[in-house]
């Protein structure tokens, strides 16, 4: 049921806020610059978002869980060090790197050219379609059908940029931005918004609610691919991540994670 999922995600939001406050007041050691620095320090600090199921969430034991979290733990295993998680929201992913709060970001971080001006991306480890979701009773086939409607999205995401451009081309679309995915889902279920932009997994979670049959995916905005984000001045770590992701793809680990958390095969992943 989505209600149970939402409670889990909301708990994650509370935990995220608390940890963010603690991290904001606690002194942090400088982030590592090389793989040797990470190994010498004895841990790798990875920024995650626990409000984006099935990629990031809080489980019944109030621990981070999901595709991204398990993938991040495997990065730690590959480096031979424990993982320390830092929780962030979508808008906080790049700042977490630029302010040295984290060594890397593993948080459905879509690879885009504008973001690559600020951070460096690994090759993709996963991907999904950004879509528009709305009640079945609402006829929507394109952005033109969103005119006169309230459209919700998560701030700083790929769909934020896409729907913002759509609103410029189609005056009358009212964009409502939310800081986390849990709030966006709640707004959709409660009728606060008429439609939402999000990952295709959002349709899956809405269908598990008491009103599940009321919602459907309307159209695809774009397919995004997720990479691990690191600072641009850390080519040593970036090269290792590319190699590590390649091995996880080749040995079937990424396919297993996709089946486990998304119940779908891993999409074909481009390389660069």
Image: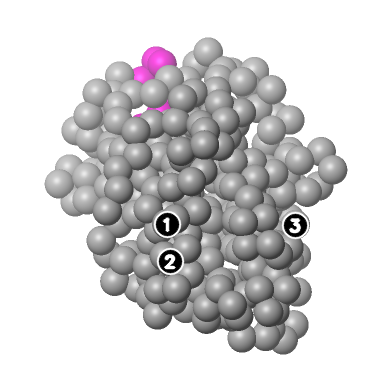
How far is mark 3 from mark 1, CA to CA? 31 Å
| Viewer-side label of 3, 1 | 1
Q: Is residue 87 visible?
A: no
Q: How crowded is mark 3: few (under 14 residues within 10 Å), some or many (20 or more)?
A: some
Query: Which element carries disc 3, helix, strand or loop?
Result: helix
- Where residue 47 appears, as percent x and y from the top left, is 59, 63
State which region is magenta: 131-138
Q: In the picture, residue 146 is in which quadrant? A: top left
Look at the numbered discs 1 and 2 and tell me whether their residues touch, using CB distance below 8 Å: yes
Which residue occupies the foreground of this view, 144 or 249?
A: 249
Mark 3 or mark 1: whose residue is earlier in sequence: 3
Q: Is residue 106 visible?
A: yes
**Does the stretch in magenta take in 159?**
no
Which residue carries the number 1 mark?
Answer: 242
Q: How crowded is mark 2: few (under 14 residues within 10 Å), some or many (20 or more)?
A: many
Residue at x 75% of width, y 57% of height: 15
Residue at x 30% of width, y 43% of height: 270
Residue at x 64% of width, y 68% of height: 45
Which residue carries the number 2 mark?
Answer: 238
**Does the stretch in magenta take in 133?**
yes
Q: Is residue 156 above or below residue 238?
A: above
Which residue carries the number 3 mark?
Answer: 15
């Amino acid at each position: 049921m989505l209600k149970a999922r939402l409670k889990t995600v909301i708990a994650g939001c509370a935990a995220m806020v608390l940890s963010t406050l603690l991290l904001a007041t606690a002194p942090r050691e400088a982030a590592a610059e090389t793989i040797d620095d990470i190994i010498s320090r004895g841990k790798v600090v990875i920024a995650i978002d626990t409000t984006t199921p099935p990629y990031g969430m809080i489980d019944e034991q109030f621990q981070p869980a999901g595709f991204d979290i398990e993938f991040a733990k495997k990065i730690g295993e590959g480096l031979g060090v424990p993982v320390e998680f830092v929780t962030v929201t979508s808008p906080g992913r790049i700042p977490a790197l630029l302010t040295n709060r984290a060594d890397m970001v593993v948080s459905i971080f879509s690879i885009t050219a504008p973001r690559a001006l600020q951070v460096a991306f690994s090759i993709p480890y996963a991907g999904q379609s950004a879509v528009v979701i709305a009640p079945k009773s609402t006829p929507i086939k394109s952005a033109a059908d969103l005119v006169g409607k309230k459209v919700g999205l998560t701030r700083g995401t790929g769909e934020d940029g896409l729907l913002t451009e759509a609103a410029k081309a189609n005056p009358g679309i009212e964009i409502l931005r939310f800081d986390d995915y849990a709030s966006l889902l709640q707004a959709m279920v409660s009728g606060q918004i008429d439609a939402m932009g999000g990952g295709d997994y959002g349709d899956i979670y809405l269908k598990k609610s008491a009103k599940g049959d009321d919602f459907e995916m309307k159209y695809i905005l774009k397919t995004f691919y997720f990479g691990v984000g690191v600072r641009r001045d850390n080519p040593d770590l970036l090269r290792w991540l590319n190699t590590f992701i390649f091995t996880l793809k080749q040995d079937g680990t990424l396919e297993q994670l996709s089946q486990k958390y998304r119940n779908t095969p891993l999409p074909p992943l481009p390389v660069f």
